[in-house]
Amino acid sequence: MSWGRKSAGSISGLTELGAFISSDTVRHLVSVYQDLLISSNGSLPKKADFDPFILRKYLANTILYDVTDPSHVVFRIVGETMKSHFKINPVGQCYLDFVPEERRSHALAAFRHCAEMPCAMLSRTRQVFASGLARYCEAVGVPLMGADPTMPATHLLFVDSPVKLERQESLDKSPFRFANLLERYFVDVGHGVPGPLEDLILKGIPNPFEEMRPKTTS
């Protein structure tokens, strides 16, 4: 495989993010999180106080990661739709084990930025299945804090959804194999966004999201 480098972008806030994303499933998480910030006068939600059922029917597309250990990203809750992709229940396993070895340090750095800043994150990928078929997806993750709000977030809540594009390939029910990252953005939720982060991007993978990029995003 041949890798290239690509810097993550930044988005100024959840309002801009909501206008940028294309999936109603992901947009619902953004709306829910935005409402929580407004109701708490800008304080980030605590994991202990967060009711996952507020996501309603979109809970099936949800993954809750435990990032308490700075060197691991552990699956804690995995929605039924996501389990069906993996063909296993990955709860208790480390997310990094599902990332190509060359990219693991970059993926971990992105999660640590979200936890330590803290900030939200949008990632767009081309997900490949055992049959060789693929689909384009977008996911948004938001930080959930522990008991001490001055410490890094203890959990990151993600909602992942396929995006309907003209280039979308047909999807069968074969197991998920891996995801090719196409682009990543950090989103300010009141504490800023990190400085430049370079990802490793597999060369030669088309990125149809490029034409959907907002002009106000760097």
Image (cartoon, helix red, strand yellow):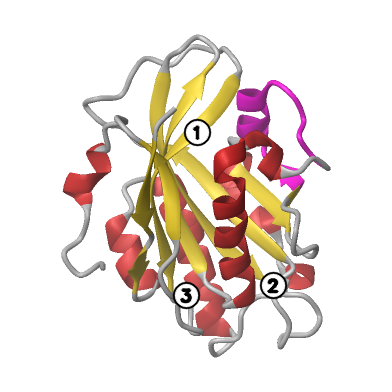
- Secondary structure state at the residue bearing disc 1: strand
Q: In this rendering, is residue 215 above or below 106?
A: below
- Secondary structure state at the residue bearing disc 2: loop
User: Is residue 48 rendered magenta in the image?
Assistant: no
The residue that mark 2 highlights is 153
Residue 111 is drawn in which quadrant?
bottom right
Name the spot of residue 17 as percent of width and height, x first: 35, 64
The residue that mark 3 highlights is 194
Closer to the camera in the image, 95 or 2: 2
Q: Nearer the viewer, mark 3 or mark 2?
A: 3
Q: Is residue 57 visible?
A: no
Say which mark, if any, is on residue 76: none
**Residue range of the region highlighted in magenta in the rendering:** 75-91
Closer to the camera in the image, 164 or 192: 192
**Which residue is found at the position 38% from the left and 75% from the top?**
13
Q: Is residue 192 left or right of residue 213?
A: right
State how far apart marks 1 and 3 are (Cα). Answer: 24 Å
Q: Do the numbered discs 3 and 2 sit on residues whose CB atoms are within 8 Å?
A: no
Q: Is residue 155 visible?
A: yes
Query: Along the polypeptide, which appears first: circle 1 or circle 3?
Result: 1
The residue that mark 1 highlights is 179
Name the spot of residue 74 as percent of width and height, x first: 76, 49
State how far apart marks 2 and 1 are (Cα). Answer: 25 Å
Query: Along the polypeptide, which appears first: circle 3 or circle 2?
Result: 2
Q: Do the numbered discs 1 and 3 sit on residues whose CB atoms are within 8 Å?
A: no
